[in-house]
């Protein structure tokens, strides 16, 4: 069992190896937020579905949770990985008692040396990526075009 706690000690992630064999190492993941004041509720009288306040935390668990104080309130940067498959990062914030994803990025790769990293001291996200047989291109051109339209220095590459 892995337990990861945010630096403000309010957001916890508990995860267990599912022992499913193979190269994909899936995990059961549960989050707990100590400042939850809004209990889960139904969407409406006619819709009995329960609102899941932690729906953005689905996946295979996290290995780092970092709080950031912003003008909008506390946000959390969560970093995670699936052994042999992907690295990911997510920025979430609590809005009306429900966690919402503000940003996410993922790198799928077979390499142990590359992926997404976060520096909590500098608040910088870095991405190392090399193409391989799993992912033959990085699909970066869409981002470059978007940034080029916004007068970015990224250019065509």
Image (cartoon, rainbow, N blue to C red):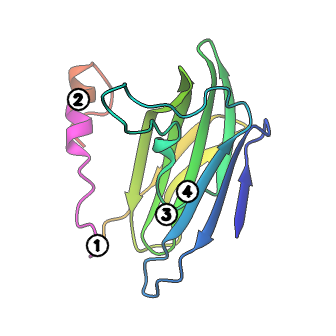
CA distance separating discs 3 and 2: 24 Å
Mark 1 vs 3, N-terminal side: 3
Q: Main secondary structure of the magenta part?
A: loop
The percent position of residue 104, horizontal first and vertical second, equals 43, 41
Dot in front, 1 or 3: 1
Q: Look at the image and say whether residue 134 sits in the magenta stretch.
A: yes
What number is the disc on residue 80?
A: 4
Which residue of the protein is positioned furthest toward the bottom in this rendering? 21
Name of the residue lying farthest toward the front? 45
Judge depth for marks 1 and 4 and give the one in front: 4
Residue under label 3: 114
**Crowdedness of circle 2 by 10 Å Cα count: few (<14), some, many (20+)?**
few
User: Spatial distance from mark 4 to mark 3, Cα to Cα?
Assistant: 13 Å
Identified at 47% across, 52% down, the residue is 58
Left/right placement of residue 67 relative to residue 138 reads right
Q: Which residue is mark 2?
A: 146
Residues shaded magenta: 133-145
Under tag 4, what secondary structure?
Answer: strand
Quadrant for the C terminus, please: top left
Of the image marks 3 and 2, the number of the one nearer the N terminus: 3
Q: Earlier in the sequence, mark 4 or mark 3?
A: 4
């Amino acid at each position: 069992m892995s337990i990861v706690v945010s630096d403000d000690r309010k957001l916890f992630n508990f995860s267990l190896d599912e022992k499913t064999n193979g190269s994909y190492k899936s995990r059961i993941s549960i989050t707990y937020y100590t400042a939850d004041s809004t209990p889960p509720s139904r969407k409406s009288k006619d819709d009995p579905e329960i609102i899941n306040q932690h729906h953005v935390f689905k996946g295979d668990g996290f290995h780092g949770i970092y709080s950031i104080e912003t003008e909008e309130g506390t946000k959390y940067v969560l970093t995670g990985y699936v052994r042999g498959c992907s690295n990911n990062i997510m920025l979430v914030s609590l809005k009306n008692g429900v966690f919402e994803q503000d940003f996410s990025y993922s790198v799928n790769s077979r390499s142990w040396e590359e992926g997404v990293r976060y520096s909590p001291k500098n608040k910088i996200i870095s991405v190392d990526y090399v193409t391989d047989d799993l992912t033959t291109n990085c699909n970066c051109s869409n981002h470059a075009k978007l940034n080029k339209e916004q007068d970015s220095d990224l250019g065509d590459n």
